[in-house]
Amino acid sequence: MTLRPWLVCLASLWLAGCQYLPEQLPLSPDPSSQQGSVSCHAELPDFDNAPCLLVDWIAFGLASQRGDRGWREATLTRLEGDRAERRLARAVLLTWGSEQQWDRASALYKADLHAAPAKLQPLLRYWLNELEGRRGLAGTLADTRRAHRFAVEENEALSQELEAMAAKIEQLTAIEQSINLRQQND
């Protein structure tokens, strides 16, 4: 029995991401054990609601991933401000934007990750690492495309040189044949 099918299955599950997590995560295994109701899933996450900290940030991360460009732009406008929680929420939002926004997201994560509550830092660090991985892959892809374009251009130039050399060889062959004909006639 080989491990290859299992590894492929595990890799597929890992690459599937968070989109298969339920939208509503329970606050605790037994909601009746809490003293009063705590409302989670704030529209914009913050550091204030400690019992819902992870739930709110995960829900916001999923919404950022699922949201379209218009939603992200509107939400980005609502997240203005210099507080660390706003800057980190912008980082989460920009993580799912265009490649140009990834640089801003990375800078925001790196600048404010230390200001997040300790309970939230591993999640934010995971998102930063995932973003850096995507940025690295995008950079590798861009380098590969540049190298391919250069190779195609170089191949085209070499083909043109080869055609020019073949034309010169044909001319030299014709000259040689002409000289040989003259020598035979003399």
Image: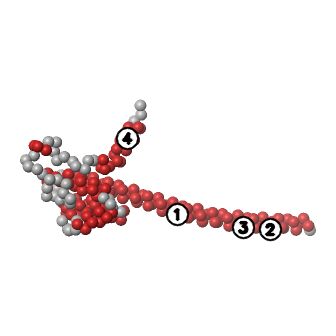
The reply to whether callout 3 and callout 2 are in contact (CB within 8 Å) is: no
Q: x%, y% of residue 73?
A: 29, 66
The answer to which quarter of the image holds residue 162 is bottom right
Which tag, 4 or 3, sits closer to the chain's start?
A: 4
Q: Is residue 67 above or below residue 35?
A: below
Q: Amino acid at mark 1?
A: Phe
Answer few, some or many: residues within 10 Å of disc 2's Cα (few below 14, many 20 plus, some between 14 and 19). few
> Residue at position x 54%, y 61% from top?
151
Picture quadrant of residue 31: top left
139 left or right, relative to 184: left
What residue appears at the point 67 percent right and 64 percent down from the top-left corner?
A: 163
Q: Please, what is the three-letter code of the amino acid marked with disc 4?
A: Cys
Q: For this rendering, which residue is in front, 152 or 90?
A: 90
Helix, strand or loop at label 3? It is: helix
Measure the C-alpha gap from mark 2 to mark 4: 69 Å
Q: Is residue 47 left or right of residue 99?
A: left
Residue hosting label 1:
150
Left or right: 140 as drawn, with respect to 41: right
Residue 129 or 181: which is nearer the viewer?
A: 129
Q: Tell me the amino acid under the disc marked 3.
A: Lys
Pointer 2 with pointer 4, Cβ within 8 A = no
Q: Which residue is mark 3?
A: 168
Q: How is the image coloured?
A: secondary structure
Residue 21, horizontal then vertical, whole percent: 27, 47
The residue identified by callout 4 is 9
How far is mark 2 from mark 1, CA to CA? 37 Å
Q: x, y (%) of residue 157?
A: 60, 65
Q: Nearer the viewer, mark 4 or mark 1?
A: 4
